[in-house]
Image (cartoon, rainbow, N blue to C red):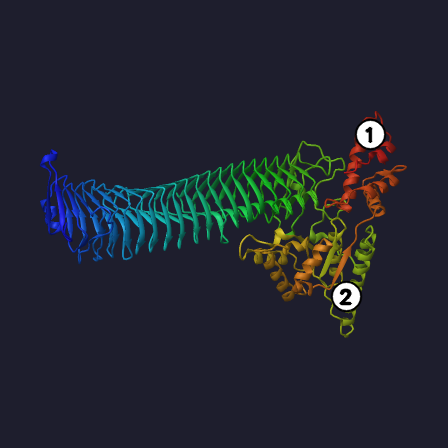
Amino acid sequence: MAQGTVQVTHTGTSRWRRRTGEYASLAAALEAAGDGDVLTVAPGTYRENLVVQRAVTLRGPEGSPGSVRIAPVDGVPLTVRASAVVQDLHVEGQDAAAPAVLVEAGTPELVDVRVMTRSAAGIEVRGGARPTVRRCTVDNPAGIGIAVVDGGGGVFEECEVVAAGQTGVAVRGGAHPRLERCRVHHTSGAGLSATGENSALEAVGCEVYEVRGSGVQVTGRGTAHLTDCDVHRTTADGITLDTDAVMTLADCRIHDIPENAVDLRSRSVLTLTRTTVRQFGRNGLSVWDPGTRVDANQCEIFDSTGDYPAVWVSDGATAVLEACRVHDVPDALFVLDRGSRADVVDSDLTQVRNTAVSVSDGATAQLDDCRIRDAATGAWFRDHGSGGTLSGCAIDGTQTGVIVTKGADPTIERCAVTSPSEAGFYVSAGGRGSFLNCRVTDSGGYGFHVIDGCRATLRKCRTERCTRGGYEFADGGPGAPEGGAAIVEDCTSDESAGLRPMVAHESAVQPTTQSTGLLGAIPGQRITEQEPFVAPAPESDKPARTSTAVLGELDALVGLESVKREVRALTDMIEVGRRRQQAGLKAASVRRHLVFTGSPGTGKTTVARLYGEILASLGVLEKGHLVEVSRVDLVGEHIGSTAIRTQEAFDRARGGVLFIDEAYALSPEDSGRDFGREAIDTLVKLMEDHREAVVVIVAGYTAEMERFLSVNPGVASRFSRVITFGDYGPEELLRIVEQQADEHEYRLGPGTGEALLKYFGEIPKGPAFGNGRTARQTFEAMVERHAGRVAQLAEPSTEDLSLLYPEDLPELP
């Protein structure tokens, strides 16, 4: 067969009628061919615009793929309007206003066709056409790779769009193609797109990558169904849904996305099943607007490369996660704005650098039977109107288990917080919340820490082995809500036999039926580990004390001799400086900020309170009140929030003392991306700008504070001296117990003092040992055992009711 000729095999109803003819042009051969004829094209370049209108087979010679080029100067190189077979052709187009291959009707087959063109589209299917396109390749850097429009359909199997100047595969106008095992890459628009009502795209086993735009885009009531597909290495979002779009993803993999892995807006609906989302620069799932909804089942979202929440739900949208895993991310789930809702069931949120669940601006979150592990904050309900329910959740290895602030009012039930480094549950700044059947174990700080007179309700809760105490309640002064009160019912702790309600104002007490503690003690504001709780008088009613009276109280504290000397020396310097100024002499500059180092329970908070009162009595401070904070009060969850929180804490302490406990936590050794540094920088500037308004005391373990000061020379230079609080010895712990006994009208019986000395000498001094707190707990345990012993006596005497004996000592831990 000569080059440039077309051999046509004409077929009839029987073999003997078959005949062969040769034609000088493709147009002539097509004109002569009938249905069923085979047109074999000789190698060469054909500058013709072909129109196939009969059910023929048009193919290049066997064994010479790419040897036949259809390359007219303009127009559509190949138009198919019948159920023909087109195979082994190379099609080239040059018309930017027309497609290279146009399929307009029938159910044709295109097999091993390579389209290299600069056309409006590489392959376009329209109308009622339903082609089967196998192993075809489209390279069209000027336009769309494959366009299926105006009701078109068909199946594309093992096809590849190797380049597209616009969208790789575009579906619109009610079209509905199916892609199987196709690859779309190096496009300058979306990899796949479906736009318009009744437009539907189905893809199975496909891969979309190296896309300058979104990997998959569905808009304007379009739908898409992806199964076992990969979308990766895009420049924009991995998957974008907008304006009533509907999509399902099953067994898919979305990864290496610099923006949102999946972004939904304007009433779009997405269903994900067994799909993984990883290595995304912004949100893994980003869900916006009323009516927009995502349902994820058995999915995994992990390995964020940016600083954004893995799942973001806002502006009234809804997200449902069931049996999902979210891990190795900055934040796991953020729900914002009234009407927004997240429901999370039987899911794991782990390895979260900041907050696992954040609820704000009136949003709602419901978590059932979930597991939160290794996060800075387990769940944070941030502000008024924000709430929801945590039910049956396990929170382990966080800094703080649950935070409730600024009027938020969630319900937390049957949740267990294990090994938080700061607090199990923390309520402040007008937060509320109901805590039912919750448990905190092995806290490095408090179990439940409720400040600012917040109206939290605790029922049937339990704390065990909490380093600073099971329950801590403190008024927050001017910021506390009027009539605020925490209500505690049927709560227990390994620290005491029972707890009664703590209320900020007596008028707010509600009657309860549970028993009070044996001492009538409550988990109230912890003035010091060695002092019983005494409800403070309102600040305006407190009589001002002289410095001599306050120093007398300092001297009355057990032990702390070196501390007392340091405070007296500093006080003397300030007093003499004040008198020199009154005499018209220069006064030496005295930095009043201090560093307290030592173990928990050694009286650091008490001394800080007295120091503030001394400075107020000398006229150095306006009020002398104490504001105690820790990392959780200063460090925010996102950029910018830390400075605001630190400023707020500083303002509350204005005119008094800002006491930062465990200050070394602001500068952890493995800080990485940590906002503690921002708190330090803000604090240093405030100390410089308002040096006369606030005294700052930082406190913590000795070794950790030495490291903290060594890595922050700017902080170290602001403090005048370091005061070390040594551990109490057995004799001093005995004196604390004796003070407790005297205050509660008990006495130590014969031999009890010696037994206590031996007990305190042998008690393990591990991380949970609390010095003064340990002495108080020992006394409470003795009273409990005494009650169990005396209750068996028919008519106990006053001596029986008062004396504590060696057998009342608890067993060594």
Q: Residue at x 70, y 43 (%)?
A: 469
**Residue at the disc numbered 2:** 574
Q: Is residue 514 visible?
A: yes
- Residue 695 seen in the figure: no
Question: In the displayed image of the protein, which residue is found farthest to the top?
Answer: 794
Where residue 435 appears, x then y in whole percent?
60, 38
Picture quadrant where residue 575 is located: bottom right
Residue lying farthest to the front in this orientation:
1
Query: Marks 2/1: CA distance?
Result: 54 Å
Which residue is depicted at the point 74% across and 37% down? 520
Asked if disc 2 and disc 1 are in contact, CB closer than 8 Å, the reply is no
Residue drawn at (82%, 57%) of the image: 562
Query: What residue is rendered at 83% in x and 39% in y?
Result: 745
Residue located farthest toward the right when viewing the structure as drawn: 750
Amino acid type shown at disc 2: Ile
Horizontal placement of 515 versus 382: left or right? right
Rendering coords of residue 135 (x, y %): 29, 45
Q: Dot 1, how many residues are within 10 Å of its Cα: few (below 14), some (14-19), or many (20+)?
A: some
Q: Answer with left or right where residue 88 lies relative to residue 749.
A: left
Q: Regarding mark 2 in the picture, which secondary structure is present there?
A: helix
Task: Give how far across and how far down residue 93 sits, in percent.
Answer: 21, 55
Q: Earlier in the sequence, mark 2 or mark 1?
A: 2
| Quarter of the figure with the C terminus | top right
Q: Residues within 10 Å of mark 2 (few under 14, many from 20)?
A: many
Image quadrant in which you'd find residue 174: top left
Q: Is residue 289 left or right of residue 775?
A: left
- Amino acid type assigned to the residue bearing label 1 in the image: Val
The disc placed on residue 530 is none
Query: Mark number for residue 790?
Result: 1
Of residues 272 and 735, the one drawn nearer to the viewer in this rendering: 272
